[in-house]
Image (cartoon, helix red, strand yellow):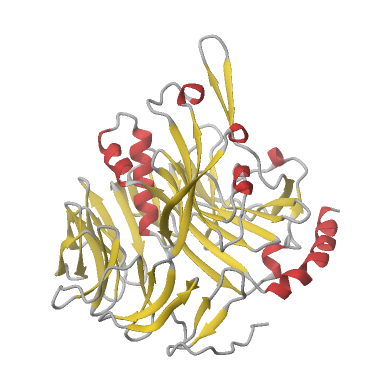
Amino acid sequence: MYRSILALLLSFSLSTVYSQQKLFKIDYKLALSPETFTQADTAEDGSLALLAALAAAFGEDDTPQVQAWVNPTFIRVETQGIMQNNQIQITNRNTDDSYILYPSMQAYTKTADATDKVHIHETEDDFVVTSTADLPIRFIADTGKIIAGLPCKLAVLEFDTDEFDTSLTQDARVEIWYNESVPSLYWGEYAYLKNIPGAALYIGAFGVGIEASAVNEIDFDTTLFEIPEDYTLQEDIYALSFFDVPLGHDLYAFQDSTSHFIGIRDDNQQVIVAPKYGSINEFIGTHAVVTNPEFQYGIIDTEGQEVIPCEWEYLALDPEMEIIFFSTDGKSGVMDYNQHVLIPAQYDHISFFSKGNALFSQEGKTGLLDLDGKVVLPAVFETIMEHDENHIIIIENERYYVVDMQSRQKTTAGYDYLLLANEGDLVVALQDNKYGYITKDGRTAIPFKYEYATPFYDGIAAVNETEDEDVLYINTKGEYVQVEESE
């Protein structure tokens, strides 16, 4: 019944969507401020330290914790990996119809498009109920920030901590950094985002939030907003069991109802691993990272055997290079699958390898090293954002620069934002709220006239000259070209 109604509603609205041919895809990652990471080292409450560890772990993984697809008519939000199992919410904002899909159960429920988060706090005399619906939104003028390459404005929801939680020592606010060129989106407990005139690219409070790591414009795909035919309607959400969770290789995680520990069973409900873990990640190749109830990391194979015992502070797999990132005594290193140490645990952080090198941080500075552990660039830079074979892009005093790796000298002036353009000597640049393209030695290659511009893919970049126009395409000379729409 619901699916038939949804299909009918879709049929009326898709003609409008196809005429616009705009769909934005936003990837979000768990984000903690530097101050929060610092507090985590000294906090008596282990939950903050755990959150910091999770943020560091998620930072090593390219998989976003939240993904959203949005245009003026539809919203799709997929959440995973933070506090719940994978679930998807699809919304038609024209009709207010919204559904939550549970892929692990092949089930769906009808839901509100978004709700206001409510907090109930017990005092000595009464209960205090605080809702985000009661918090006014204040828009902050003359305040800007670049997130995922897009200029953002700031809105805040301020509340008195005495009425919210007496354990908090300071008045607080929810910060919302948003971009007006991307349609607004809302889901779950984020109903207040309906009042934001654009997509929220950061939502957070007390230094903890989610932040967009990438925003891309893609072809419209109707299947993103349809309920799969093999999904079953569940009238009662509480009738759903959120286990089994697919791990790959026809294996599934399940939770013991008494101990709450997690084990593995196969398609035939045969137990492969008895419930004994605090968490089990999806298999990457033939290995999966697990944690024991004390949050120590290990690695198992598809037979459920611990190939690396659960005795590590942190582990992350890179199957392409067949290496494992590990942490011990608060320091990061790299070893191979046989636990042979390739890079000793002597750095504060090591990123995944790209173009033969990895970023590492030491004493608050960033550098580059190769897989042999040789320091390619010492940790003398405030922040290295990305690199290719010969250049790096750094942030210094909130300005972006290109630096030649051999001379270690800046080759450009400071810009509001820089991003390697994937094409020879070109770099995407933002200056005075306009995008253009420069060369790595600082010359303007394509004028600063765009509201938004992307790197080049197969020699073509997407740009907007105004906020309201459809996307245009240019080649590396800045000439407009026609791109065939994929069917």
The reply, left or right, for residue 340 in relation to residue 268 is left
* The quadrant where residue 425 appears: bottom left
Judging depth in this view, the residue of 171 and 348 nearest the camera is 171
Vertical order, 101 against 472 (above or below): above
Q: Position of residue 311 (x, y in %)?
A: 28, 46
Residue drawn at 35 percent across, 46 percent down: 33
Residue drawn at 49 percent across, 35 percent down: 158
Residue drawn at 30 percent across, 46 percent down: 34
How many numbered marks, from 0 up?
0
Q: Is residue 282 visible?
A: no
Q: Where is residue 2 in the image (x, y as percent from the top left)?
A: 82, 53
Q: Where is residue 213 in the image (x, y as percent from the top left)?
A: 44, 60
Judging depth in this view, the residue of 243 and 381 nearest the camera is 381
Q: Can residue 245 be seen in this view?
A: yes
Q: Split into 4 quadrants, where in the image is the C terminus?
A: bottom right
Q: Position of residue 463 (x, y in %)?
A: 51, 77
Taking the view exactly as shown, the residue that stands out farthest to the top is 125
